[in-house]
Structure formats: C-alpha cells, structure tokens
Amino acid sequence: MESRFRPEIAGLRAVAVVSVVLFHLKLGSFQGGFVGVDIFFVISGYLITRNILSDLQADHFSLGQFYVRRTRRIYPALIFTVVVTYLVGALWCSPEMFLDLAKECTHALLSISNIQYWRESYQYFAPSSDELALLHCWSLSLEEQFYLFWPIFIILARKAGRVFTIIAVAAVASFVVSILVARTDPLAAFFLMPFRIFEFAVGALILPLEKKIKPNVLSAELLSIGGMLAIGASVLLFKSDMPHLDVAILLPCLGAVATILAGDKTRSSRLLVNAAMIALGGISYSLYLCHWPIIFFGRFIFGDDAINTLTGTLTLIAAMVAVAVAMNLLIERPFLRQSDFRSVSFRKNALVFGSLILALAAVTHITFLSKGFASRIPKAQLESAHLQDFPSDQDLIPSQGPIRFDLAGDSHATQYIAGLSKLAAQLDVRLDARTAAGCPLLYGVTLKNSRRREFCESWRDQTLKYLEHTDLPLIYSQRWELYTDQTVDFDFEPGGAVPSPEEALEKLQFAIENMIKMIGARRILIIGDQVKASCQINRPRLLEGPLPHAPLPPCPPTARDLVDQSTAPIDRMLSRIQAKWPDRIELMRPVDYFCDSNCPVVKDGVWLYFERTHFSVAGSQYMVAHAQDKFRRFLEN
C-alpha cells in the first residue's frame, strides 16, 4: 500500500482544525465546527490502518514500535500543553478553579479525559464546558485509547483473512450501538471510545474502496465537490443540540471519505492542496492542542467584552498560530525524526515517557488533594471566596444544644444550611440536615433516566424512614419545578402523555400531600419557589487568584413583580397544601423576604448566588437574616 504524502489529507486536517477553532471562538456561522473532531477520527482511522497493513504486508510490523511512534507523535506536545496550562492556572486561578484544572491535567496526562468528562457531567454542580481549560483533550484521550487496541484488532482480523469485512462489521455495530446509547445517555455516546469506533472504521474502509474504485476525471471531481460540500454544510448548518445528531454525524464523515477518495488532482481539490492549507495541516495537531487553552485564558484574564471584538478575536488567532508553529518546530518535529524513534526500544521509550507522565500526574494530583494550594491566596480573599461558595455541612456551627429541628430536601434545602446554622447557634439548638442534590424527597417519586436514580431512591427511603420516627419540626425545601413528568416517574401514575404544567403541579401536589400524611403529625415549614438570579454565574470569573483577571460582569437585580409572576404557580400549589393542614403546616415564600422592590444578586460586592438557582453562603445568610422572625417563630413555638 502506498504511503506517499497526501496533500489533500493535509488540507483536510487544516479544514478540521480551523472548523474546531472557529466553533470554540463562538463565531455564529460555524456552530457545527465541532465536526472537525469527527473528520480527524476518519483521517486517523485511514492512515493508521494503512500503515499497519503496509507494515504487516512487508513483514516488518512491530507492535512495540507502533506504540513508540504513537507515543512520540502524541505525548511531547500534549505534555507541554498540560504543563503550560497548569503553570498559567497557578498564577491566575482561584483555589477552587485550580483544583478543577489540576484534576483535568491529571486525566489528560493519563489519557482518560473523556471518561472524566463523561462521569462528571452527571454531577449536580458539574462545571460547564466554558469552565474547563483542557476540555478539548477528551478527543485525544479517546484517540489514544483507540490506538491501544486497534493494531491488535487489525492483526487478528488479518489472521482471520477478512480484514475489511470485520472492520465493516465493527463499524456497523459501533454505529448502531452509539445510536441506541445516545437515546438514554447521549454524553456516553459522545465521549466514550466504543461509540466512536465507527468513525475510525469508516476511515479504514477507504483502503479497499481505493483499490476497487478508480474514478475518472469527472467522477473524481464530483467526489471532491460532494465531499467538501458535505463538510461545509455540516460546519455551517449543524448545531450541538440538533435532534438525531448521532445519525447526521455520518455526513461530515462521508464527506471526508469522498475527499480522500477523490485525491489531489481535481480542480476543486486546489482549495485543499495550496501551500497555506498544507502548512496549516502540518501544524494542525499543535494548533488543536494550544487553541482552547489560549481561548479559555484569554477570555478569563481579559474578559469576554475584550475578546469578543474583531481585534480580540484576531489577537487570539495570531497567538494560536504563533504558539502552534513554535510547538511544531521545537517539540513535535524533533520527536518525529525517523532516526530517533527507530533507535529507541519500546522498553526505554515506555520508561522515559511513563516516568515523566507519572511524575507530572503526581504533582497535579497533589494539587487536587491540597484543594488547589489555597496558601497562594491571601486570607481575606479566601474568606470572601467562601462567602460566595455553596453552603455545605462544613457551614454547620458546632452546638452542644439538643437537636431541635430537621432540614430536609434537595440542594434547595442544603443552601439554607449556612443561614439556619447561624440562627440555630443563637437559639442554642442544633439542626439535623438530611439533603441530597437533585434527589426528590417524595413518596412514590423517582428520577427518570438518570444515573443518580438508584442513589436517590436509597437516600429517599432512608430519609423518609427517619422522618417517620421523629416528631421534630421540619423545614422542607426542594426545587419543586424540577420534579414534573419530564424528569421523574410517579409510582401512583398509570402512565400516558406528558401533562400540561397545571396537571404536572397537581401530581406534584398529590406526592407532597402523600408524604405529609406518611411522616405523621409534626409541624412543617415548607419553603416556596426559589428566587432565581437574573443571569448565569461564571464561577471561575467570580473568584480571584494570585494575579488579577477580568471581573464577572455585573448581574442586575430582578424586578419584584417579575419574580412574583414566575414563582406564583408553585407557591399557589403549596398554598393549597398548607390550607389543608393550617394548624401544623406553614408556607414561607422566599420572594417575600429576599426581595423588596427588586431582588438583589450582589450585595456590598459579594455575590448572593452560587449559581443561578442556588444561594451562596452569603445569600443563605442574607435570606435567613431577612426571614429571621418567621424562622424564629416556627422554631420557638
């Protein structure tokens, strides 16, 4: 099999990396630029399979040398990217942000970033993609996992005598399974290697097509035009939230296949094989590695307003290209010289890279365990950061007094710990907090299609069993609107179509009333619908590191009448419940205490919200202080 330089593939790499860069720059016309990763997978599948089969045919394939070449191709530039990202984070990141970044560095070094992001995407307070400095490393981890097993797979398939038939079967199986998995766990289908095998396999299947198809001038031209149109349409028309994107992703993959089959002799291929595109393709790996950290820290340090200008965008692009060229010349190329890797044994190569990776991973993991080296930050700054953190059990104030009341519910109950603990200390009593983020505390209600379902069911049963055997006053709060037919299963419901919002609230009301009956005659203070912040809150931008960065843009207060309107449906439903047991159930509407004519988000420079739907420690204390008389009367009666 010929292994000559293919200029159209270099150009295709350039298209792929430019698409990803423009997508991450959030340029409106390139919302489908994420398909550049899929194109990279097709190219990798083609080239890797071609090289393995070529070496096997010549009878000089070595599994050890294959891993040596892959290691020297991937890890030097990756290690450099991780180290520089870590050092920049040490200078600018708050402990909370540096802790997360250090964890990302560890997983990137160990080539399991994709698994990390998949697992952590199910955490209730998982960081958004804009808060992850090494998010793009998921695709490299996935590709490295592919390289581990693919040569062995090809060797076994070749021994069976049906290489491409077996690859085709693997492609179909992976594609079908990925579609099925995407219906229940779309993030697994996106991040995990088994569900991406079909893209690599599609690239490998170009090889038999090249032998069988010898396109004439016209058909080659049509293939080239069709391939580029398919890729261009995907980049310009796809959106990450498109329905059935898992099926549509075949379009850019087949576009890459057609472009490679067409070769570099067509007129339309000139768009790919000119000197600029080939040069860009040559630095595509380094450009892919450095582009996202540069965008991430550019926005973080200088602010979106500065970066989202023409000057800011062009500056970022210039920085990416300059860094990518330097990385390619100084890091990539020295490790790719034939004389280098052919003279290095597999054992020596594994020892050198393995030792370096483990040493660096130890440093990043220690950073994680040390909570982001908080000693880098002045004490006053740390105290301010804590006020803007989410309340937790650590905010419980120790008390020798008896347990006098229970606090139960999901994270909307947890957020009251900081304020209520302070009030309990004044009353010389203790509160017993029984909360779990994202878990409904309701009889007969379980999460629908969630990996937390089993955990939440177990926690619910334990908590309800406890509540059945105590008569302490109960403060009960949940994110009520979260538990409707779209997100939960009602055991008492026979099934059917998704109801209207009014019907959904009727089912929720029934579930709450059922719980009140089951836990016995006790006094309950139900906290109504949460007052939400008027904007999304970017946590990394909120907190300060050793060096200054652009502050979080101001979040204006919300008009009281708008909050009244948004909270009214839930609060009316809860009022109907309170009216059925007026002697032992009270309702507290947060809007009546947190807001005056407006509902604040920031007070005296301190953010009252951890994120849009949850109070921070400061917000919890602010809310409880303003509702202190209501809470005191409930607890003292």
Image (cartoon, grey):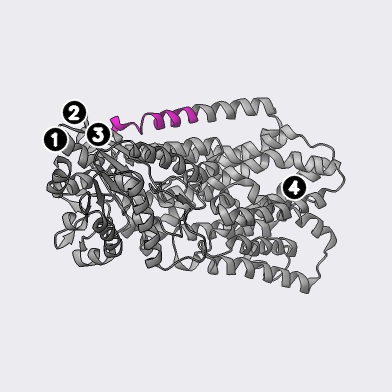
The residue drawn where x is 38% and y is 36% is 99
Q: Which residue is mark 2?
A: 401
Q: Magenta stretch?
A: 360-376
The secondary structure that most of the magenta stretch takes on is helix
Question: Is residue 491 left or right of 168 when viewed as pictured?
Answer: left
Nearer to the camera, 609 or 26: 609
Q: Quadrant of residue 115?
A: top right
**Which is closer to the viewer, label 4 or label 3?**
3
Q: Are marks 2 and 1 in contact (CB under 8 Å)?
A: yes
Mark 3: give few (<14), some (14-19) or many (20+) Cα within 10 Å. Answer: many
Most distant residue in the bottom direction: 218
Q: Amino acid at mark 3?
A: Leu
- Residues under labels 1 and 3: Cα distance? 14 Å
The residue drawn where x is 30% and y is 61% is 573
Q: Amino acid at mark 1?
A: Leu
Q: Which residue is mark 4?
A: 49
As drawn, 525 above or below 75: below
- Residues under labels 2 and 1: Cα distance? 9 Å
**For the C terminus, which image quadrant?**
top left
For marks 2 and 3, the one nearer the N-term is: 3
Is residue 361 a member of the stretch shown in magenta?
yes
Numbered disc 2: secondary structure? loop
- Residues under labels 4 and 3: Cα distance? 59 Å
**Which is closer to the viewer, label 2 or label 3?**
2
Numbered tag placed on residue 427 in the rendering:
1
Q: Which residue is mark 3?
A: 396
- Residues under labels 2 and 3: Cα distance? 13 Å
